[in-house]
Image (cartoon, rainbow, N blue to C red):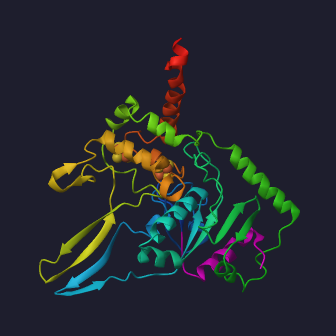
Amino acid sequence: MERFYCFSKDKFLDFFKALESFGTVQAPVRVTDQSFAFRAVKEPKEIAFEALRTILPPKKFFYPGRETLVSWQGNEVKDHQPEIQKQVLFGVHPCDLAGLGIMDTIFSADPQDNHYLLRREATIVVGLSCMPDKHCFCKSMGTDTPDSSAYDIFLTDIGEEYFIEIKTPRAYSLFENDQLLLKPITEEHREKYKDFWLKRSEAFQIGFASDNLRATMDMEWDNPIWDELGNRCLSCGNCVPVCPTCYCFDVIDVASLHEDGGERIREWDACQFTGFAKVAGDFNFRPGPVDRLKFWYRHKLHGFEDPHGMPTCVGCGRCTVSCPSGIDDIVGTVLRLQAKVEEEPKKGPANDK
Ligand code: SF4
Ligand code: SF4
């Protein structure tokens, strides 16, 4: 089994049929002039190949916004087994693959989350190359090349053809009945592939140096920039569900009013909500939007590094485009904070002489 092949875009219908033989194909479709969403598609013409970021990231397929964990009737408690359907997630860009890799790390850590892992196992992920727009900064976060732990297949657009990497045996088996679809790659294909990734790397319009994010956040923790941003925050929580790596949830018991039974439900929560950090005794240890915004930035930029060796922001730009107050310009904020750090030594004793 070779790992790299190519196929003509004219043959995309055959490729699509091969994917469909595994399960329902979920792909980006256009929802409005400005927005896209992953939806089930029946034909390639429904796919918005031009989509960069969908409203919600792929996490919704593995970790739904609301689900039942257990139910009870009288004294009998039952684990809720989710209905798992085989599916193919098509068109996942490198930032979202990195997001999936991070979610895999979180949900497979002890104690494992079986609901997530069962859905993940039932899904073939097909990555797709993209060109960055003015909000993309995955290059700054080191997530601009596809995370190979997260996909089964990756397609790079090299013009008339796709350069295809097939990484898992189950993905390879989809094409066994159509030996004519995949062609061996030539030196020319390799050159086009390298050209694409070089051009993509040069196409980023925004970014920052990411090697000092922890120091920047620590040194600028009391910077007035946080008051300026936090005081504009509406605590609407938009920035959280759209983030491919935000995973906090609340657990609620819902008792039936008519029977001696009920359900324990898990649903997405958001650290930007006013009551997220409220504990017993009505004490809120992040009472204001400034506290919550700083916490969120820290968690995204370096808070995950100690346990897992990586930040959780993958540079997708979703929070930037979905914040109604124009706050979540992560690149702009980091550049402002880094500029302040640069200024600090000039105030120090050596410069005061
Ligand atoms: S913090 Fe914002 S830019 Fe970073 S991964 Fe989350 S939504 Fe994307
Ligand atoms: S989307 Fe913007 S306004 Fe809403 S909680 Fe996030 S930072 Fe605050």
Q: Is residue 157 above or below residue 164?
A: above
Q: Position of residue 10 (x, y in %)?
A: 73, 69
Q: Is residue 301 above or below residue 78?
A: above
Q: Which residues are magenta?
A: 1-26
Q: Position of residue 150 (x, y in %)?
A: 59, 67
Q: Is residue 210 left or right of residue 220?
A: right
Residue at image x 61%, y 51%?
Answer: 142
Q: Position of residue 251 (x, y in %)?
A: 28, 67
Q: Quadrant of ligand 2?
A: top left
Residue at image x 47%, y 75%?
Answer: 117
Quadrant, the C terminus: top right
Q: Quadrant of residue 149?
A: bottom right
Q: Quadrant of residue 50?
A: bottom right
Q: Is residue 117 above or below residue 197?
A: below
Q: Is residue 246 left or right of residue 199?
A: left
Can the viewer see residue 101?
Answer: yes
Farthest residue in the top direction?
353
Farthest residue in the right direction?
187
Compare residues 243 and 299 and report the one nearer the observer.
299
Farthest residue in the left direction?
258
Quadrant, the N terminus: bottom right
Q: Is residue 170 left or right of residue 228?
A: right
Magenta span contains residue 25: yes
